[in-house]
Image: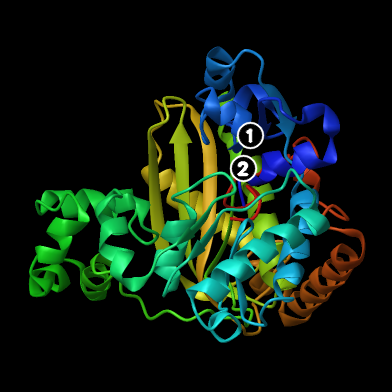
């Protein structure tokens, strides 16, 4: 989808159509541009640019707070629409999906016809301001790359014999799966483009990157055997990041926000039936430098207070006390579906009050979860969290409160 959040807002509000707009978080002074409209991009505004910088480049830009519910509604609408064309639809992100139309299209001419028909239906269902760029190719890797090559509202067809030409016109990190860190490591090996990557010995790639090395070799030749998976898969991680209202040295304030974030992550773990085995934390300072750490938990957890205790120890071990904290991020990994160890008040509750008291606190937390299922995640809160409020933010890849 093209400038997705911005185009949804322009579709919803005629006043915003044709004007440069930027989707931001609730706090205009301490947030970034999550998505810029096509008009704003043409004037130089980019995703992840600070609001003050965007305003400097484009004084006429209109900032609009993100609305995750609105975007989720449209995402569900266009994925339902895709089922008219094939039952093999894989939602890749909030604004991207893969469709396997091999059987329906028969050949590239048929695929092009489906692409054009899809555009018409998208306009009918979602509105004329919400457009998509479509890539048609032999595999998912090339299809995604093709969809990003012509924006907005493009339709690009890449056949097998075109794959090398397309790849050689792109930068390494333009390909999904090659991030900035991987690209930097490739550069360190003297690999600056896909031609050099194809010519690099596969054995040395595997020695350097393990299994990723083989994938890189295949990707450089335009080969990929990943299938479109229409079945819902379990998330690989659940996390939360938050930019504090102001850069701060105040440990008590940081701890409050961290506890609130841990409670949100824990609620989502329990809501979806998961426990976490690995936890990572990241802090960003006022000068935008940062530090992070990860650990494997002694026992799988889905209780906010337990997550908080572990996370705070990690933060203390990497924190630079001379730097004010701007942002905190926590992420849980290695999720599994099993019965969690839930303690409402503290990890020592069982030893102090005995097993019966531990069972009661588990029952209390279970009851509170039922309240949240019925009335939302603000149905209850800890007394220590009353002075703070975690405002929702959004980005082009995920909602800030649901990493």
Residue that badge 2 annotates? 3
Q: Is residue 196 left or right of residue 4?
A: left
User: Which residue in the rendered view is the most extreme toward the front?
Assistant: 109
Can residue 168 be seen?
yes
Residue 118 percent coordinates (x, y): 68, 64
> Is residue 357 depicted above or below 49 in this figure?
below
Between the residue at mark 1 and the residue at mark 2, the CA separation in whole angstroms equals 5 Å
Query: If you read the primary sequence from the N terminus, does the residue marked by circle 1 or circle 2 appear first?
Result: 2
Residue drawn 70% across and 71% down? 82
Residue drawn 59% across and 77% down? 234
Residue 381 percent coordinates (x, y): 81, 51
> Which of the two residues, 47 or 363, is positioned nearer the viewer here?
47
Residue that badge 1 annotates? 37
Q: Is residue 188 left or right of residue 43?
A: left
Q: How is the image coloured?
A: rainbow
Q: Is residue 121 left or right of residue 258?
A: right
Residue 322 percent coordinates (x, y): 39, 25
Q: Give the image quarter of residue 211.
A: bottom left
> Which of the two residues, 338 or 256, is positioned nearer the viewer here?
338
Label 2 neighbour load within 10 Å: few <14, some 14-19, many 20+ = many
> Which of the two residues, 152 or 230, is positioned nearer the viewer here?
152
Q: Secondary structure at mark 1?
A: loop
Residue drawn 38% across and 33% down? 289
Q: Secondary structure at mark 2?
A: loop
> Is residue 130 depicted above or below 135 in this figure?
above
Q: Give the image quarter of residue 212.
A: bottom left
Label 1 neighbour load within 10 Å: few <14, some 14-19, many 20+ = many
Residue 346 percent coordinates (x, y): 66, 62
């Amino acid at each position: 989808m093209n400038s997705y959040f911005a185009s949804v807002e322009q579709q919803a509000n005629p006043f915003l159509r044709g004007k440069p707009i930027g989707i931001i978080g609730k706090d205009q002074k301490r947030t970034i541009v999550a998505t810029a409209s096509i008009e704003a991009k043409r004037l130089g505004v980019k995703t992840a640019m600070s609001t003050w910088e965007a305003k400097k480049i484009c004084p006429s830009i209109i900032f609009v707070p993100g609305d995750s519910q609105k975007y989720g509604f449209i995402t569900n609408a266009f994925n339902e629409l895709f089922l008219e064309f094939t039952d093999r639809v894989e939602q890749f992100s909030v604004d991207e999906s893969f469709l396997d139309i091999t059987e329906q299209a028969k050949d590239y001419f048929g695929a092009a016809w489906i692409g054009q028909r899809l555009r018409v239906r998208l306009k009918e269902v979602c509105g004329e301001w919400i457009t998509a760029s479509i890539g048609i190719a032999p595999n998912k890797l090339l299809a995604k790359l093709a969809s990003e090559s012509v924006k907005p509202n493009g339709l690009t067809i890449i056949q097998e014999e075109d794959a090398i030409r397309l790849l050689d016109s792109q930068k390494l990190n333009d390909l999904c799966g090659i991030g900035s860190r991987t690209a930097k490591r490739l550069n360190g090996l003297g690999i600056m483009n896909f031609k050099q990557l194809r010519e690099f010995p596969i054995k040395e790639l595997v020695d350097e990157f393990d299994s990723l090395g083989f994938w890189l070799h295949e990707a450089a030749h335009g080969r990929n055997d990943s299938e479109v998976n229409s079945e819902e898969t379990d998330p690989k991680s659940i996390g939360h990041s938050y930019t504090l209202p102001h850069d701060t040295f105040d440990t008590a304030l940081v701890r409050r926000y961290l506890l609130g974030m841990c409670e949100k992550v824990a609620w989502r773990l329990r809501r979806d039936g998961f426990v976490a085995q690995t936890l990572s934390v990241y802090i960003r300072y006022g000068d935008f430098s940062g530090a992070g750490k990860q650990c494997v938990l002694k026992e799988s957890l889905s209780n906010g207070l337990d997550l908080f205790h572990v996370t705070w120890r990690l933060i203390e071990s990497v924190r630079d006390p001379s730097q004010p904290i701007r942002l905190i991020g926590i992420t849980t990994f290695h999720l599994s579906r099993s019965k969690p160890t839930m303690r409402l008040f503290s990890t020592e509750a069982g030893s102090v009050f005995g097993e019966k008291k531990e069972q009661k606190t588990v029952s209390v937390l279970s009851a509170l979860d039922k309240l949240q299922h019925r009335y939302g995640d603000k149905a209850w809160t800890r007394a220590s969290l009353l002075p703070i409020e975690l405002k929702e933010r959004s980005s082009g890849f995920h909602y800030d409160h649901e990493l």
